Image (spheres, helix red, strand yellow):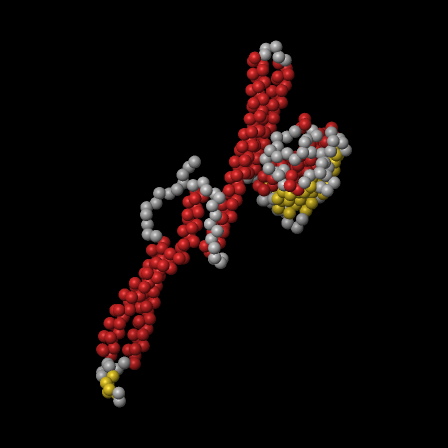
Amino acid sequence: MRDDTVDRQPGVSVRFKLTLSYAGFLMLAGVLLLVAMWGTLLRYVPERVTRTPDGLSPNRDFVVHTFVQAAGQVLPFLLVFGLLGGWILAGRMLAPLTRITDATRMATNGSLSHRIRLPGRKDEFRELADAFDAMLARLETHVAEQQRFAANASHELRTPLAISKTLLDVARTDPNHDAGEIIDRLHTVNTRAIDLTEALLLLSRAEQRSFTREHVDLSLIAEEATETLLPLAEKHGVTIETGGGIAPTSGSQALLLQLTMNLVHNAIVHNLPEQGAVWVNTSVRPKTVVLTVENTGEKLTPELVSTLTEPFQRGTERIRTDHAGVGLGLAIVKTIAHAHDGTLTLTPRSAGGLRITVELPATDPHTDR
């Protein structure tokens, strides 16, 4: 891991700078006040000593001498008071920043569970602390998901590799074993490993958003996906119905086609044993376009549906074991939707099956990028 920290020379602390600023402003205000008093007093003081009914009135030289002595005593007091008060005030003002800095250091050392939870009313420091807490929460969730995904991916990849090793050991230790059967099983296992690897690469590509955006019509993509998977649906007695109008959006046509293919394939695989149905529809809302894929099937609970987008999670047993996926179909759909600034919603149907809705930002089909 590359260390991007900068080795800086020690400098003056912000607290000390603020203290000097407070003291400097206080001294400046004191000097200006004394100058204003000076000008006001000298305007009404005569240059010579005058006699009044109460006695002699001081002249200007006497007032100047007395005023200078008083100012000489007040200004040092203001300087000390400004430095001491500024140091205390700066410390109180920067106390939240110290807590934020400590939390940042803890997060840098790997402690993502720590939260600042800065008390008090809303101000700039509280907003910064709350934003940092929210960032830590999202980062902790993301790291946990990545760790869980890495563990699941390792487990899924280990299975075909272990099977391949076992088959090769059988072929080596038992020369009389049917070589054609071993080759067929190795081909099946190797195909599954390749599919899983390609799915992981596609998931990584979608997460990194490393694609070029272009104008896309979701209705055309839905038609292409259903036409491609129609032979599979007909083979297993599942009917597919498509509908809807033009649904213009922007993004990667290949990724959005993969998204739609995964949804339709998932709807065919997880369906009724007989007379199943899949409905694919596109629609336009004021600011978004919507792709909806529904299918018949077993009744699902909301708790189970909420976990289906997790990698390697499978809701029910497939009725099409010859077209089983690798457990990343809906995870890839979710990632592609988020990469296109969209949302994915899964809702169990009351009659059984699942309704999946993908909502993406709408664009003007006549606008060239």
Q: Does 235 sit left or right of 27 as displayed?
A: right
Q: Position of residue 335 (x, y in %)?
A: 58, 39
- Say if residue 217 shows up in the picture: no
Q: Residue furthest right?
A: 275
Q: Residue furthest top?
A: 176
Which of the 4 image quadrants contains residue 365? Answer: top right
Q: Nearer the viewer, residue 309 or 191?
A: 309
Number of marks drawn = 0
Q: Does 261 sit left or right of 158 as displayed?
A: right
Which of the 4 image quadrants contains residue 71? Answer: bottom left
Please report the residue visible at 71 percent of the width from the left and 44 percent of the height from the top: 245
Please report the residue visible at 44 percent of the width from the left and 47 percent of the height from the top: 103
| Image quadrant where one finds the C terminus | top right
Q: Nearer the viewer, residue 218 or 280?
A: 280
Q: Position of residue 349 (x, y in %)?
A: 71, 41
- Say if residue 206 shows up in the picture: yes
Q: Position of residue 213 (x, y in %)?
A: 58, 41
| Image quadrant where one finds the N terminus | top left
Q: Is residue 19 above or below residue 265?
A: below
Q: Does 67 sit left or right of 25 as displayed?
A: left
